[in-house]
Image: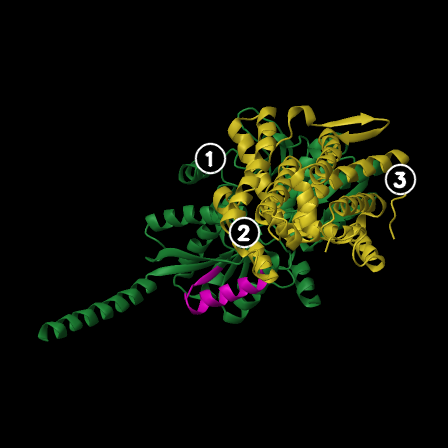
Amino acid sequence: MDFSSTISASGLIQQFLIGLSRSTILFIVSSGLSLVLGVLRIPNVAHGSLYMLGAFLCYSIATLVGAGSTGFWVGLALAPFCVAFVSLVVERALFSRLYDREHLMLLLFTFALMLLCRDAVKMIWGSEYRSLAPPEALQGSLSAFGMMFPKYNLFLLSLGPVVAIGLWFLTHKTKIGKIARAAAVDRDMVGAVGINVSWVFASVFVIGCFLAGLGGALVAPTQNINQGMDHTLIMEAFLIVIIGGLGNVWGALLGALIFGLTDSMGILVWPQFSIVFPYAVVVIALIFRPKGLLKATW
Amino acid sequence: MKKGVIALLFVCLFAIAGIWSGVVYAAEEIKVGIIDTYSGPPSSYALDVLDGFKLAMNKINAGGGILGKRLSYVTRDDKFKVDLGLTSAKELIMRENVNLLVGTINSAVSLAVSDLAKKENIPFIVTYGKSSNITGAKGHKFVFSMNENTEMIGKAAAIGLAKRPFVKYWIAGDDYEYGHAVADAVWNHLKKIKPDVQLMGQSWWKVGEPDFTPYITSILSAKPDAVIVATGGAGCIPFLKAAKNTGFNEKIPIYMHTATELSTLRPLGLDAPEGVIGTANYYFYYPETPENKAFVDEFRKAYDRYPSFGSLIGWCTASFIAEAYKKAGKVDAEQFAAALTGLTINSPIGNLTVGQFDNQLMLPMFMGVTKKVPGYDFLIASDIVTIPPNELITTAEEIRKAREQK
C-alpha cells in the first residue's frame, strides 16, 4: 500500500479539472457513438478509426495551411467536416444498402470499415509518429492559487458544455433531431408516416462520425498522432456508452464524467494501480444497474 | 508434331537450366532473414534499422561481397506478435534457407526466436529488443545483441544521475516488461552508487496511454526532486508533449532514457520541452568525427533523412555479418558464431566490440539534455557526457550467475 501521503486541496482541485477536460473528449466521442447506436442500432466499431482520421486530417490541414496558430484552427474547423463527408460517402454508397440485412452483417460492415480505415491511414500517412502543437495562445499553463492548469485543457473544458448544449438543441429543437428520436423508439412507425427513414439514418450516422472527427481533431495537440490511437479510444468509448445506457446521449455524458474523473482521481490517490480505477467503477455500475445508469433506448 | 516436340524439349532445357542456375545463384549469396515489426507504430524504428542495413549491404556488395558471395536479405513482418514472429522465423529457415536471422524490436519475439535459433543451430542477431535476458539469463552461443539492454541503460542512467544533486525520486512508466525492467535497473544501480536516494512514489500507466496530463499533475503535487520516466517507443512523444504543456520540465527535472534520441525528438519538432535529461547510444551530430560525418552524409544521400540509432544498429549488423564471415573463412553457422564473439569493427562512433561472455555489443552511452539549437527544426541533445562501454558491461561473473539462476 503506497497511498500518496500529501494530497493537498489545491492538488485535488487541479486533478479534478484535468479529469473534467479528459471527460470532455470522451463525451464528444462517445456521444457520437451513442447517437448512432441509439438510432441505427449499430455498435459502430469504426468510430475509433474515424476519430483517428480526424486527428490525422487536423494534422495534415494544419501543416498544409502553415505553421502557427491559424493552421491549427483551420485544421480543427475543417477536419470534422472532412470526416463527416467521408462517412456520408461510405453511408450512401455502401452502408445504406445493408439496412434491411440482419444485424450481424451491419456489425461486420463496421468492422471491415475499421480495418480499411486503419490501412488507409497507414498508406496515406505512413507509420511515423506525428505531432501537432497547440496554438500559441493555448500553450503553456495558467497558475493560480498554487495550482497549475494547462491552457489547452481549460479550452477543452470550455468546449464540453458547448457540445452538450449543441447536441441537446439538435435532438430536441430541430426537426431532424425529433425524427431521429422517434426513429430510435419505433423506426417502422416513422417510416409509416411517410418520412424517409434512410435519410434520417444517414444524417444521424454523419453527425455521429462528425463528433468522432471533432474529438480526434481536438486531441491532436495533446498526444502523438499514430496508428494505434483508434483502439485505445474505442474501448473506453464503448465502456462509457454501456455504463451510461445504450443509445442515451446523456448517459454518455454521465459515463464520460465518471470515467474521466475516476481515472484522474485514481492517479492522484493511488498512482501505482491507477489503471484499475475506471474499470472497477464500470464493474460496480454494471452490478447495480446492468442496463446502464440512464434509460437505454434499446 | 515435330515442332511441338522440339518446343517441349526447349522448355525442359530452359526449366533445368533455370533450376540449376537458381541453385548456383543461391550458393553464391549469403541470405539474411530479417523479422521485424513493419506495421503499426514500431515500424518507424524497424525501417530505420532496415535502411541502415541496406546502406552497409550495398557497400559490401559493391566491394565484391563476402568471400565472393553477395549479401542479400528477405523481410517478414511479425506485427509485434510472438506467434507470428516465430512462424516467420521457421519459414525463413525452412523455405528461404537463410544463413542467419536478424530482428526484432519486440523483446518477447526476440526471446522466442532466440530459443528457436538455439535449437536450429542458426545465428540470430537481435537488433532492437532491449531485454537484458536476451544476452543475459537466456543467452547462448548463437544469439547476439546489437543494441543496448535494460541493464546497460540502468547503469548509464545511475552513473549520470548520481552526479546530480537529486535525492527524492519519483518513478513513472509503462506498465509492461520494458517499463518495469528499465525502472528497476535504473533504481537498483542508483541505490548502489548513491545509497541516500529515496523513492517517494510510483505511477504506472497502460501501454499506449494517450494523455499524460493527469499523471504529471499528480506527480507535481508530490514535489519530488526528479522523476525517472520509464516509457519507450510511442509513449515518449505524448509524455514530452504533456510535459511541455504543463510546464513540468521547468519545475521538476525529468530523466527518460530515449528522450534525446532522434526518433523521439524529430516528430515533436520545436514543440519538445527543453532541459529533459536523456541517454542514447547514437546522435548523428556527436561525436563529431569524420567517420560519423561520412556515415551521416551517406545515409542522407541515400534516404533523405538523418540517421537514427536504429540506422546505426542496421549498419552495424550488416558490417559485423561481413567481418565475421571473413574471419570464419567460410559460410558455416558454428564458425560464424564463434568468429562474431569478441569481434571488433570500426563504426561511425569508433571501435565497437561484441562481448566475449555474453555476445552483447559493447556500446557507449551518451547522456545529454534537450535543447533548441539554431539550424535544426527539432531539438537536439546538448552538454553531452560519454559513458564508456566498460562501465556498462555485465561481467562474466554476473552472466554466469544469471544463467545458473534460470
Residue hosting label 3: A7
Please tell me which residue is depicted at 33% across the width and 64% down the height of the picture: B27
Q: Chain of mark 3?
A: A
Instruction: Work out whether residue B358 or residue B100 is closer to the camera in this orientation and state it.
Output: B100
Residue hosting label 2: A96
Specify the label residue A100 is tagged with: none
The amino acid on which the numbered mark 3 sits, given as a three-letter code, is Ile
Q: Position of residue B192 (x, y in %)?
A: 77, 48
User: Given this view, does label 2 or label 3 mark the residue nearer the observer?
Assistant: 2
Look at the image and give the residue range highlighted in magenta.
B81-101
Q: CA distance from mark 3 to mark 1?
A: 51 Å
Q: CA distance from mark 1 to mark 2?
A: 59 Å
Instruction: Work out whether residue B362 or residue A47 is closer to the camera in this orientation and state it.
Output: A47
The amino acid on which the numbered mark 1 sits, given as a three-letter code, is Lys
State which chain is coloured yellow.
Answer: A
In the rendered image, residue B85 lying in the magenta stretch gets the answer: yes
Tell me: B248 left or right of B373.
right
Mark 2 Cα-neighbour bin, 10 Å: few <14, some 14–19, many ≥20: some
Instruction: Work out whether residue A255 or residue B387 is closer to the camera in this orientation and state it.
Output: A255
